[in-house]
Image (cartoon, rainbow, N blue to C red):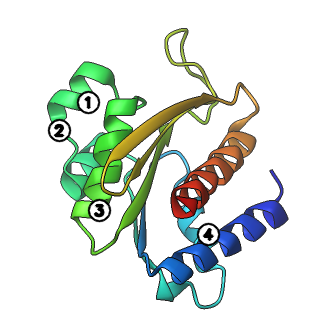
Amino acid sequence: MTDSKISILARDVLSRAQERGIMIATAESCTGGMISAALTAIPGSSAVYERGFVTYSNAAKMQMLGVAAATLDAHGAVSEPVAAEMALGARQHSTTHLAVSVTGIAGPGGSDHKPEGRVCFGIASEAVTTVTVDFGPLGRDAVRSAATFHALTLLQTALAD
């Protein structure tokens, strides 16, 4: 995914959020702040982007977002239940209306059960929904970029409803 496509999408997300008066938060693991960076690269983003959580470790997910140890133990960090708790935690630990979360395996590596390129997303507003995307073994940079683009697309879709 090119930086220009990500930038165009980020601008649209911010514009839609501003039109609707909706504040946004992000909870990121494998993207390491790339979604936050894409949004805050746009002048005026502070009108709708409230905060981001980079929770790379399981301890950070629990401490900063309230992800339950039992959820991590039962499903692992790369799972829809953890993505859901991350998105919900981002909303609960901010004053936002909408939050997106990302947790995945950017690579290199992975396993048969959780291959490289698998990324789980959560989106929280009044309800929490999740989705898993297998981007494939594209390489670390490409998986992180694709996950950033997909997370912004999820925000865009949520803001269209």
Which label's residue is closer to the chain start, 2 or 3?
Answer: 2
Residue 72: mark: 1
Q: Quadrant of the rendered structure where residue 67 is?
A: top left
Of the two numbered discs 4 and 2 in the rendering, the one whose residue sits closer to the viewer? 4
Chain-order first, disc 1 or disc 3: 1
Q: Position of residue 14 (x, y in %)?
A: 59, 76
Instruction: Say what amino acid the circle numbered 2 marks.
Output: Ala
Q: Kindly indicate whether the residue at mark 4 contacts the one at mark 3 (C-beta within 8 angstroms).
A: no
Nearer to the camera, 93 or 61: 93
Q: Secondary structure at mark 4?
A: helix
Q: Position of residue 49 (x, y in %)?
A: 47, 77
Point out residue 84 in the picture as x, y percentages from the top left corner: 34, 41
**Hey, what amino acid is under mark 4?**
Val
Amino acid type at mark 1: Leu
Q: Determine which residue is flagged by label 4.
A: 13
Q: Secondary structure at mark 1?
A: helix
Along the line of sight, the residue nearer the viewer: 131 or 18: 18
**Which is in the foreground here, disc 1 or disc 3?**
3
Q: Is residue 50 left or right of residue 138?
A: left
Could you say which quadrant of the image residue 146 lies in?
top right
